[in-house]
């Protein structure tokens, strides 16, 4: 969906996050996408080998296959909006007179799994289809999935009760957090980090202020987690070494609650491209040519703000561990 249009309401990829059914997105991501300036959250352009780039390439082919299979006449990439609730909207991958199509491309590296039954569809994809059905007023929505080389099709039917429940959640959430400005607790998602770095790219110096009373609980919780987290990390590493000693030259150990393995990875050849390039330049190029080539391939890497905790309590913990 266009970033500017995304700010106008709740889309199909938003609704599952609002009810905590999206493994890749949460409600803080949704809120940021509604209130942030587009340039502060824009993703880098997908590279040739990026999964998103792969998805864009496959999408039109998936829609074509679904249209042929179900004998549909559809228009790709259609904006939809509920006739009575303006904040309920979305972008249909393809839309016909009575049926819509959602196209998904799943790579071999994806953690998502699909089976033969519609019950195997991940919840956030199913909710997206139910949302589009209610928003568009269509009778059916086809989820067409190119799953690691296999085409799978799932047909969803409009569920008025479910859609009305989702619409209620979306409307209440929008009123609270977008209209009235009630904050949502940020998480450490990529979007949150990207938004903060671009919204506050620099800092004033010196400008260290005293904490407000309302901020102390959050700051102390972070300090406590840093202190105890270091202990937990050390204990985890100690236990790993002790278990490796138990495994010795076996593959691993299993028990009723799980298994732990200690396997050797395959040997592989690694090419040191930087050293090769330096060797070739020194052997075959004049100093002026080397300098020109280095300048051509040099770029400035923009600095980012570094988050650093300093506390005598943390220092004392480190000294005791040393």
Image: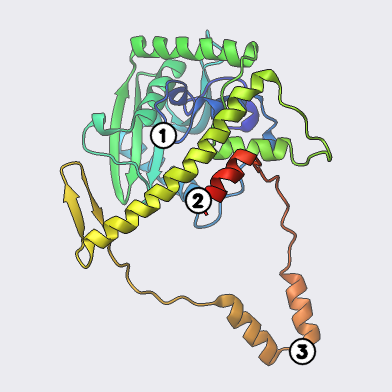
Which residue has dot 2 on it? Answer: 321
Q: Position of residue 238 (x, y in %)?
A: 37, 54
Asked whether residue 269 is in view, the answer is: yes
Q: Nearer the viewer, mark 2 or mark 3?
A: 2
Q: Nearer the viewer, residue 19 or 46?
A: 19
> Dot 3 surroundings within 10 Å: few (below 14), some, or many (20 or more)?
few
Numbered label attached to residue 184: none
Q: Nearer the viewer, residue 213 or 62?
A: 213
Number of numbered labels in the structure image: 3
| Disc 3, SS | loop
Circle nearer the N terminus (3, 1): 1
Residue projecting furthest to the bottom: 283
Residue projecting furthest to the front: 320
User: Where is the N terminus found, in terms of image quarters?
Assistant: top right
| Disc 2, SS | helix
Asked whether residue 41 is in view, the answer is: no
Q: Position of residue 165 (x, y in %)?
A: 40, 10
Q: Image point 33% across, 54% down: which residue?
A: 240
Which residue has dot 1 on it? Answer: 23
Decide: is 209 above or below 83: below
Q: CA distance from mark 2 to mark 1?
A: 37 Å
Q: Image point 63% across, 86% down: which residue?
A: 279
> Dot 1 surroundings within 10 Å: few (below 14), some, or many (20 or more)?
few
Q: Position of residue 271 (x, y in %)?
A: 50, 77
Q: Image point 77% across, 30% down: which residue?
A: 209
Whether tag 3 and tag 1 are in contact, CB under 8 A, the answer is no
State the image quarter where residue 184 is shown: top right
Numbered label attached to residue 286: 3
Residue projecting furthest to the left: 256
Decide: is 146 above or below 70: below
State the image quarter where residue 37 is shown: top right
């Amino acid at each position: 969906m266009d970033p500017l249009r995304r700010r106008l309401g709740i889309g199909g990829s938003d609704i599952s996050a609002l009810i905590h059914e999206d493994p890749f997105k949460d409600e803080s991501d949704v809120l940021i996408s509604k209130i942030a300036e587009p340039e502060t959250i824009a993703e880098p352009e997908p590279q040739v080998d990026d999964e998103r780039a792969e998805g864009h390439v496959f999408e039109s082919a998936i829609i074509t296959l679904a249209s042929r299979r179900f004998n549909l006449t559809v228009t790709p990439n259609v904006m939809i909006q509920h006739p009575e609730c303006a904040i309920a909207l979305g972008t249909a991958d393809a839309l016909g007179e009575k049926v819509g199509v959602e196209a998904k491309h799943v790579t071999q590296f994806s953690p998502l799994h699909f089976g033969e039954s519609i019950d195997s569809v991940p919840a956030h994809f199913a909710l997206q289809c139910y949302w589009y059905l209610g928003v568009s007023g269509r009778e059916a929505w086809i989820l067409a999935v190119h799953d690691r080389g296999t085409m799978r099709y799932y047909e969803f039917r409009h569920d008025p009760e479910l859609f009305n429940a989702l619409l209620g959640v979306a409307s209440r959430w929008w009123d609270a957090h977008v209209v009235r400005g009630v904050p949502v607790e940020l998480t450490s998602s990529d979007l949150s980090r990207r938004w903060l770095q671009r919204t506050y790219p620099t800092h004033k110096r010196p400008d260290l202020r005293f904490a407000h009373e309302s901020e102390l609980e959050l700051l102390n919780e972070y300090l406590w987690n840093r202190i105890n987290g270091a202990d937990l990390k050390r204990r985890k590493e100690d236990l790993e070494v002790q278990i490796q000693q138990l495994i010795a030259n076996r593959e691993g150990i299993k028990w009723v609650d799980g298994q732990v393995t200690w396997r050797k990875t395959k040997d592989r050849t690694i090419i040191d491209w930087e050293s090769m390039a330096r060797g070739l330049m020194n052997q075959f190029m004049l100093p002026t040519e080397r300098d020109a080539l280095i300048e051509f391939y040099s770029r400035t890497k923009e600095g980012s703000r570094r988050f650093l905790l300093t506390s005598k309590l943390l220092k004392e913990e480190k000294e005791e561990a040393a």
